[in-house]
Image (cartoon, rainbow, N blue to C red):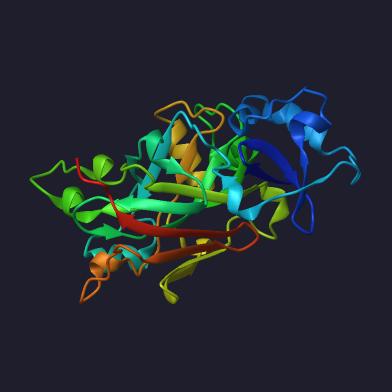
Amino acid sequence: MRLVNAAGRLTLMLEDDRGIDVETASGGRFAADPQAVYEVWDEFREWAAGNHGVEGTIAVDDDALGAPVPRPRQVFGIGLNYRAHAAEAGVELPEAPMVFTKFPSSVTGPRGVIDLPEGSVDFEVELVAVMGRVAAGVRAGEAWSHVAGLTVGQDLSERELQTAGPPPQQVNMAKSFAGFGPIGPELVTPDEFDDPNDIEISCSLNGALVQKTRTADMIFAIPKLVEYLSSVVTLYPGDLIFTGTPSGVGFARQPKLLIGPGDNLVTVADSIGEMRHTFRSAPRA
């Protein structure tokens, strides 16, 4: 199953860029609001599995796609979850997931313009897991049954704020500027993948490939992340887990490769699709 936020309306995707407006097709049983579906995920999956045919399908405007999870309660990030990225950062491999947060107000959709704050803004392509059930004390072997689906994201980061001052540094703030958590274009359920633990992700800056990996290279796979997080906090339907970025980030390069005004960033995940963003200098107060 594939879901999108089509101009603010929950839409079940079919082939050829056509979809089913969920509120209309369900006779109002499910709301148009894309965020609301995660609270009734099991009920919705049962309904969506029915044969709805192609009558009444709508054309989906690719340029009008929004975040498939527009207002998550919690957004978790995982640091140093690929060995090559830990190596380029010059740190030892973590013994447990390194967790930070991105504030929910940073979430935006898969298309559009993002304002650049002052400083050094970096790209970080990541696979993003979306929760579909409450998870507390969930074991890794049960974790996939609590995941609604997967999407792709960018953990955009302002590195100067992130690294300023003595520890603990401002990691959460540096990753939470408006627009610094784009996700999309589709939410894809785990059963749609040959192996949801092994998905190719990549991103390109101004047409040049800068990051590419397979998520099988993660140190902590999604089931382990759900197990670890839910051992401490309760995960709620619609929560996001940014699962970590591979090597190739711009701040670790010599010379540094940072995002500037007018730059174009394309972010891709197999079977999920492509995000496209341009950047401009943020208006000054």
In the image, what residue occupies the spot 55% across and 38% down? 69
In the image, what residue occupies the spot 71% across and 50% down? 60
- Answer above or below: position of 32 versus 142: above
Residue 261 percent across, percent down from the top left: 30, 62
Please identify the quarter of the rendering in which residue 231 is found: top left
Say whether residue 60 is left or right of residue 269.
right
- Answer above or below: position of 140 versus 195: above
For the residue pair 254 and 197, the one nearer the viewer reads as: 254
Residue 247 percent across, percent down from the top left: 36, 67
In the image, what residue occupies the spot 42% across and 53% down? 113
For the residue pair 155 and 111, the one nearer the viewer reads as: 111
Image quadrant holding the C terminus, namely top left
Say whether residue 208 is left or right of residue 80.
right
For the residue pair 57 and 35, the one nearer the viewer reads as: 57
- Answer above or below: position of 79 versus 263: above
Say whether residue 23 is left or right of residue 56.
left
Please identify the quarter of the rendering in which residue 263 is found: bottom left
Residue 256 percent across, percent down from the top left: 22, 71
**Is residue 155 in sight in this rendering?**
no
Residue 16 percent across, percent down from the top left: 78, 59
